[in-house]
Structures are given as C-alpha cells and as structure tokens.
Image (cartoon, helix red, strand yellow):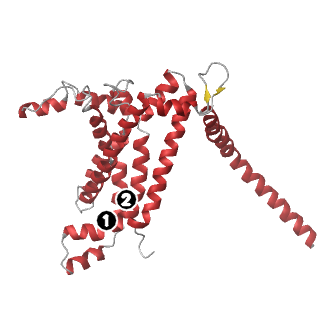
Amino acid sequence: MSRQVQDADERRLARAETLIAAAFLGPWLLGLVVFTLGPILVSLLLAFTDYDLNGMPNWIGLDNFREMFFEDPRFWRSVRATAVYVGFSVPAILVFSLAVAIVLNRGSRMMPVYRVLIYMPSLMGSSVAVAILWRQVFGREGLLNAALAPLGLAGGSWIGSPSTAIYTLIALSVWAFGSTMVIFLAGLRQIPAEYYEAARIDGAGPVRQFFHITLPSLSPVMFFNAIMVTVHCFQAFTPSYVVSQGTGGPVDSTLLYALYLYDKAFRQLDMGYASAMAWLMLAVLAMLTGLFFATSRYWVHYGER
C-alpha cells in the first residue's frame, strides 16, 4: 500500500471518529446551552430589569439591588432567618454526622443494619412528606409536647412561635444527616490502623487519638462536607415552604432566602427582583467557598504534601 493511500485511510478514520464524537457530544452541548448557559445569561440580564412575565423587560439598572438593600425589610428578615438556619445547621450536621460515623465505624455484626436504618432519613431528605410530618411532631398537639407533658415541660406550638419556629427547621435539617455521615464513614475507613496502634503504645488515650489522628486525617473529608452542607443549607426551601404553608411565618421567622426568592418570582411575578436575589446568593456562596479554600491551607492536611 502506497504512503498516499495509507494517509488517506488515516484521514477518513479521523473524520469518522470526529463525527462519532460530535454525535455523542451534540445532545449534551445542546442541553448545556439551552437548559443551563442560556437561562443563566437570561437571569443575569433580568436582574437589571423590571419584568413581570407580561410584556418586555424594562431596563432599570441597579434599582433591584438598591430596593433589596435599602427598601425591603422582608429581604433582611429572610437574610436573618437564613443566617440563623445556616449558622446552626452546618455545625450541627457536621458534628452529629461525625459522631454517628465514629460509632458506626466500630465493628459489630448488626452494624450493616444500623447503617441502613440511620441512612434511611437521608433517602427521604427534607421532602414534602417529611416536612408535613414535622408539622405534626412540633405542633401544639404534636409528638414532642406529648413526650414532654409527663415532665411538665410541654409548651405551645413550636412551629407557631416566632422564637422557636426556625429551630424546628434546623432540627429537620440535622435529621437528614445520612449522606454526610456516609462520607465521614468512608474517610474513617481510610485512616491506617497503625496510627492508632502506635498512639496506644505511646500512651495516648481516646481523646488525644481523636484530636491528633482522627481529625487531622479527616480534614480533607471535613473540608468537602463543610462546603457541600453549607451550599445545601443556603438553598433550603421545602422545609420552610411546607412548615409555614409558604408564608415564611410566623412573623417571617421561617422566611428562608430561597422561599422569599420563590415568593418574589412566582407569586409576585417580579422576575427581575428574584433574579437579582439569585445572583446575590451566588455571589455569597462563591465568597464563602473561596473563604473555605483560602483558609484550607491552615487546617486541611493531605498526608505528606
């Protein structure tokens, strides 16, 4: 076979491979442009407009952001509720998940059963059904008050009180800790047993082993979980929507940021304002994630690096 014929065959094969790759990538690229990049760019433009789904968007510059920061008290109440929710939920989920993972990491014949039972709430997550169940548990005639009644501690409706309603949502977020726990458990399994054996020979107790071996070895897992849980908590919507029946009440105490964004977009049809809120949340999450990465060099350890 001459060299020219061989080169021609190679070019035909290369073109065929290119066409096959394009055929497989085409639907994904189309979906990326139509369902991801396109809506993102449209949302960015709408953030600077006054648009109510009727007619054309009206360009108003930074007015949505000015109204948000200086003229909308509900916006700040949603920020405060979200800050409380994230501030309590993130550390509670991380600590509780790690504690359960450490317990489950100990050998036991029934341990696979325990793992399944503990992970099951995460399969249901913060779904509508679970949120409705939560209303029954923390209601005036709910299970919690029934359990506290013999102790003389039963109160009114935990969900109906502005001072306690947000904490019922925090309890709901901690309840679905299974995914975070599974990741911690996988991290614990990667710590060499020789570390603990050497520590015990040197006389280190369980507490010193935890702070000098377990926590440093788990720091990359902690880093990952902290970011994922933080993002998830900022986006929490279903619990507050169902528990408050979409109002964010009582007295906006459960008005999480995502719920107020939904209210602006799909009840008040103020798409421009809702888009501005969405981009502000993106900016805050980006800054927090950047803060995690910037500080990781001081508390995240990657073995011999």
User: Where does label 1 land, which residue?
Assistant: 215
Position of residue 31 measured from the top left corner of the image (x, y, whole percent): 65, 41
* Vertical order, 140 against 22 (above or below): above
Using the rendered view, name the quadrant where residue 54 is placed.
top right
Q: Between residue 165 and residue 206, name the one nearer to us.
A: 165
Marks 2 and 1: in contact by CB < 8 Å?
Answer: yes
Element at label 2: helix
Give the residue at x 39% y 60%: 221
Position of residue 186 measured from the top left corner of the image (x, y, whole percent): 36, 60
Give the residue at x 34% y 69%: 191
* Vertical order, 159 against 113 (above or below): above
Q: Quadrant of the C terminus?
A: bottom left
Q: Between residue 88 and residue 63, name the one nearer to us.
A: 63
Q: Which mark is residue 281?
A: none
Residue type, numbered disc 2: Met
Q: Residues within 10 Å of mark 2 (few under 14, many from 20)?
A: many
Q: Residues within 10 Å of mark 1 (few under 14, many from 20)?
A: some
Q: Is residue 1 visible?
A: no
User: Where does label 2 land, which residue?
Assistant: 222
Residue type, numbered disc 1: Leu
Position of residue 153 measured from the top left corner of the image (x, y, whole percent): 10, 33
Q: Is residue 133 left or right of residue 5?
A: left
Q: Quadrant of the N terminus?
A: bottom right
Give the residue at x 35% y 54%: 182
Q: Earlier in the sequence, mark 1 or mark 2?
A: 1
Using the rendered view, name the quadrant where residue 144 is placed.
top left
Q: Between residue 258 and residue 105, name the one nearer to us.
A: 258
Q: CA distance from mark 1 to mark 2?
A: 8 Å
Position of residue 120 measured from the top left corner of the image (x, y, whole percent): 32, 44
